Amino acid sequence: MTTKQKANNVPRSIWPINKLVVVPAMWKEINWTNPLSWPLWLRTGLNMTKNNSVPYHVHLYQRMDPQSRPPYNWPYCRNVHEEAGVYLQFIYDYYYDLPEKILFLHGNPFAHSTHPIETALCVRDDVHYVNINSYWIQNRPWSIWSQDANENGTLMYPCASRILKLLGYNPELQLNPYRINPKDNSFISTYCCAQFYVTKQRIHHYTYEQWLKLYNASHEPYCTTERDREKPGEPGLKWFGGSFEHLWHVILGLYSTNMQVPISGTNTDRCHLFRSSCLESPC
């Protein structure tokens, strides 16, 4: 069999060639019954404006109807763990046919970034992960979250530990490398919050089986104990989703949990991750 014949047997990807695929974690941020009222960036990415020159494509999930009946006739994702549930759903659905470049966004993407899509389009081709928000968290201890009366510490730290363990990490060494006691006083430093650009190659840093473990864990009633059970769609801390929000830079960025503060003119400055000539580059 020739190389050309082998290539012809490879299933064609469903994704548009050389386009950024945007995955927003939508819930009630839009009026699902009136698509004409949706924000322009969303309608444009869904090809509702018939503009074929748009450099990105939106893949939209709805978290309302498991049967995907109108007006929710879009792929369904269970409403769990805020944006993390949508991000994991996408990786689970398309692990073997991921787009080359992906931007995961909140339902309201402008709360943390002025130009989130345009910023992602400025990422260099040799970069595999970057948070596109500008808000920096410095030395946030895990103990910032309320203490569990039945445990010696918070509920967030053990949930984060479980997530990392499912990916094959030693969670104690990853979260608390200097063995601070109590361990909940170890720090997180990173860009907040969970809106980031990532490549297919970086998601494939982990096996499908590892992502499947995370996906299945996201559908369990709680992360590590009945006391961290979440109520989807209701106010209150989301332990599983909150843990992911403070771990994406570790999982997909391959950074330390407590990243070094960015310093201009060094490789800690994220400006080297963007094309300087790009109009919406954050630098």
Image (cartoon, grey):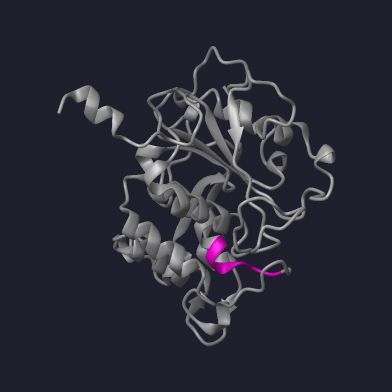
Quarter assignment of residue 210: bottom left
- Image spot of residue 171 (x, y percent): 34, 64
The residue sitting at 37% across, 46% down in the picture is 96
Q: What residue lies at 60% left-to-right and 63% top-to-bottom?
A: 78
The quadrant the C terminus occupies is top right
Q: Residue furthest bottom?
A: 150
Q: Residue at x 69, y 21 (%)?
A: 51
Of the pair 149 and 131, the residue shown nearer to us = 131
In the displayed structure, 198 sits above or below 8; it is below
Determine if the magenta segment contains residue 237.
Answer: yes
- Quadrant of image for the N terminus: top left
Query: Is residue 7 left or right of 157 when viewed as pictured?
Result: left
Query: Where in the figure is residue 168, as x and y percent of width and height?
Result: 29, 61
* Magenta-drawn stretch contains 272: no
Q: Is residue 213 above or below residue 259?
A: below
Q: In this view of the protein, can residue 255 be seen by the observer? A: no
Q: Is residue 14 visible?
A: yes
- Range of residues picked out in magenta: 236-241
Q: Is residue 154 above or below residue 180?
A: below
Front residue of this view, candidates 115 and 78: 78
Could you tell me which residue is drawn at 69 percent across and 70 percent down? 236
Looking at the image, the residue that sits furthest to the top is: 277
74 on left or right of 239: right
Count up the numbered dots.
Answer: 0
The quadrant where residue 54 appears? top right
